[in-house]
DNA sequence: GATAGTAGAAAGTGTCGCTATCCAATCTAA
DNA sequence: TTAGATTGGATAGCGACACTTTCTACTATC
């Protein structure tokens, strides 16, 4: 198919597709002549994946490029791809200067307690220290106490998430890795949304109020 | 204190404080003369809260303004404030045009099944439909099956979250509502981070691999 | 052979979150 | 008391980002 049809099928404007091509988010089509190229189903799929990560996950173009690099790496194991995807999805925490000693300790103890194998220089760990530091700055030093509850919940969710990924085992390698990316990015968003709904339900039950769910 | 000290105490540059004043994220200081104002502890606190929402939560200035509006509304109940905060934190989903009928059905059934009182026009519901639509577009129509696992986890987390908020009951009204905002914004981020750590742990255990946690 | 579509490059656009520059007034330290 | 720093307030500018627009030199198709 040509670029116009690719645009129609994916819902992405032609200039944006050209932009993604330039940025390396989409492999070039097969050139049939100096100014004609043919695109395939893979392009449609890839384009939808890019849009999902950008629109739903809020990833930057650079982060998407990193994720796609992991998917396209023929050397990468599933586990490694999962690591790369999660690293790309975890935003850098710019704030190490005003880092709190107690917060770092809270994070270290938490990770040890749960048996997570998260290095102190991994983005996830750094980000957690950042969150706890921020919590303490705004006067919530007990915030760290919630982490164990979160972890209990996440341990179970993680099992089911991984089940889901291995469920895709029938597909090609790339399809499975794509499942990892989709599961991570869409899963984060879905989890946050479900959390809101659950909080609202609990809040209503406890206060006896209801109705305002923030509809605009 | 004057603006220079406010800047030093909060770690926010003076021009940025002025910008936040202009944007209505920070109440004006008490004017002692036409070009001199005094700021208090409340300003330090508010400034740190703003930074937490912007840096950790990734909220836009406009969203922060909405949240703060809820905190400052003397009419608002805790439940209502929770609703407003969560609405402000939930990004609008721009994609209703290419909305999937099946996805909407999946979301509706999910909400009914869990007993959530989430209106079809609430941002959380719309966003969920958007996520499920996107999942189906990239070929993951079974993604919705994960939602119940997420909800099981979130129901328990929500209980503890609300416990935490009511724990703050000793504070002033504003402090408690601030706790809601902090818990929502920092909690979202913390939950996502813990989820990554848990996934990594499960992935390692299952594949027998280890080591790469995406450190950069 | 007229019209529409195409690849590729370059420059432009709009938004966002600050940042820099001014100014007149005021505080502050010598 | 006076020089220099700081302040509130207003306006303009900046850099990053994610596109969009415009252009040119083709090519496909009717």
Image: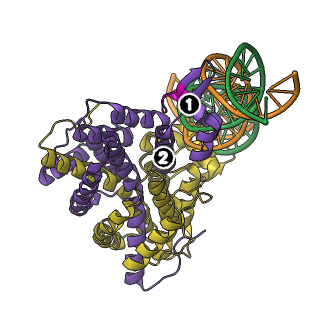
Chain colours: A purple, B yellow, C orange, D green
State the image coordinates of residue B11 (x, y, percent, origin top left): 43, 40
Task: Tell me if residue A97 can be seen.
Answer: no
Q: Nearer the viewer, residue B196 or B181?
A: B196
Label 2, secondary structure: give it: loop
Q: Secondary structure at mark 1?
A: strand
Vertical side of A94 occupied by B191: above or below: below
First of labels 1, 2 by sequence position:
1
A151 with respect to B209 (left or right): right
Q: Percent position (x, y) of residue A68?
A: 40, 35
Residue A62 image point, x, y percent = 46, 33
Give the quadrant of the N terminus of chain A.
Answer: top right
Determine if the magenta segment contains residue A137. Answer: no
- Cα distance between the residues tagged 1 and 2: 30 Å
Determine if the magenta segment contains residue A28.
yes
Q: Determine which residue is flagged by label 1.
A: A38
The label on residue B113 is none
Q: Which residues are magenta?
A: A20-30
């Amino acid at each position: 198919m040509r670029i116009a049809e690719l645009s129609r099928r994916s819902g992405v404007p032609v200039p944006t597709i050209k932009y993604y091509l330039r940025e390396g988010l989409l492999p070039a089509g097969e050139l049939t002549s100096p100014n004609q190229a043919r695109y395939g189903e893979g392009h449609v799929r890839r384009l939808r994946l890019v849009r999902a990560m950008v629109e739903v996950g809020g990833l930057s173009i650079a982060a998407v490029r990193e994720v796609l690099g992991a998917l396209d790496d023929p050397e990468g194991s599933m586990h490694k791809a999962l690591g790369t995807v999660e690293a790309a999805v975890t935003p850098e925490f710019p704030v190490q200067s005003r880092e709190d000693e107690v917060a770092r300790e809270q994070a270290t103890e938490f990770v040890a307690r749960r048996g997570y194998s998260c290095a102190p220089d991994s983005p996830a760990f750094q980000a957690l220290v950042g969150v706890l530091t921020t919590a303490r700055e705004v006067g919530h030093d007990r915030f760290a106490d919630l982490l164990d509850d979160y972890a209990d919940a996440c341990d179970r969710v993680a099992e089911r998430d991984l089940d889901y990924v291995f469920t895709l085992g029938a597909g090609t390698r790339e399809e499975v890795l794509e499942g990892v990316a989709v599961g991570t990015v869409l899963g984060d968003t879905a989890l946050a949304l479900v959390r809101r709904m659950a909080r609202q339900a609990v809040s209503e039950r406890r206060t006896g109020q209801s109705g305002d769910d923030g509809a605009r």
